Image (cartoon, helix red, strand yellow):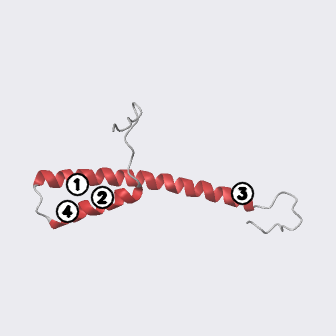
Amino acid sequence: MATPKKAAGKAPEEPDFDTRLERLEALVGELEEGGLGLEAAIERYREGVSLLAGAREQLAGYRKQVEELTQGVEAALAPYAGDPDASEGDSA
């Protein structure tokens, strides 16, 4: 059975944050154990740096989402203008 082809020009799917973190932990373990040749250690280090950069980018995106959601909630909870039950000291 043939596998479906990916759309032309579409980048391979990026690993999620947890997958990146697990791989980073595995790489750190390999490097800490020693026993790797110089080239292998540098390759693991290079992969780790790339994974870390991607994880930081994902975290920045998640942070932005949380900030946007929080702003939406705060706006929804703010009393409407002229609300007789809201006092001037209330700031939701």
- Is 29 on the left-hand or right-hand side of 72? left
Residue visible at 47% across and 53% down in the picture: 60
Q: Earlier in the sequence, mark 1 or mark 2?
A: 2
Q: Earlier in the sequence, mark 4 or mark 1?
A: 4
Element at badge 3?
helix
Q: Find residue 58 and report its horizontal and vertical position in percent.
A: 44, 52
- Name the amino acid, label 1: Tyr
Mark 4: which amino acid? Glu
Q: Nearer the viewer, residue 27 or 11?
A: 11
Residues at marks 3 and 2, CA–CA distance in whole angstroms: 39 Å
Secondary structure at badge 4 equals helix
Identify the mark nearer the N-term, 2 or 4.
Answer: 2
Disc 2 is placed on an element classified as helix
The structure residue drawn at horizontal position 76% and vertical position 61%, both measured from the top left corner, is: 78
* Distance between mark 3 and mark 4 Cα atoms: 48 Å
The 10 Å Cα crowd at callout 2, few under 14, some 14 to 19, many 20 or more, is some
Q: Residue 43, percent across and down? A: 19, 50
Q: Amino acid at mark 3?
A: Ala
**Mark 4 surroundings: few (<14), some (14-19) or many (≥20) residues within 10 A:** some
Which callout, 3 or 4, points to the residue nearer the camera?
4
Give the CA distance from mark 4 to mark 1: 10 Å
The label shown at residue 45 is 1
* 87 with respect to 43 (left or right): right
Of labels 3 and 2, the one closer to you: 2
Left or right relative to 51: residue 72: right
- The residue at which mark 2 appears reads as 23
Q: Secondary structure at mark 1?
A: helix
Q: CA distance from mark 2 to mark 4?
A: 11 Å
> Which residue is the site of mark 3?
75
Residue 27 location, quadrant: bottom left
> Residue beneath label 4, please?
30
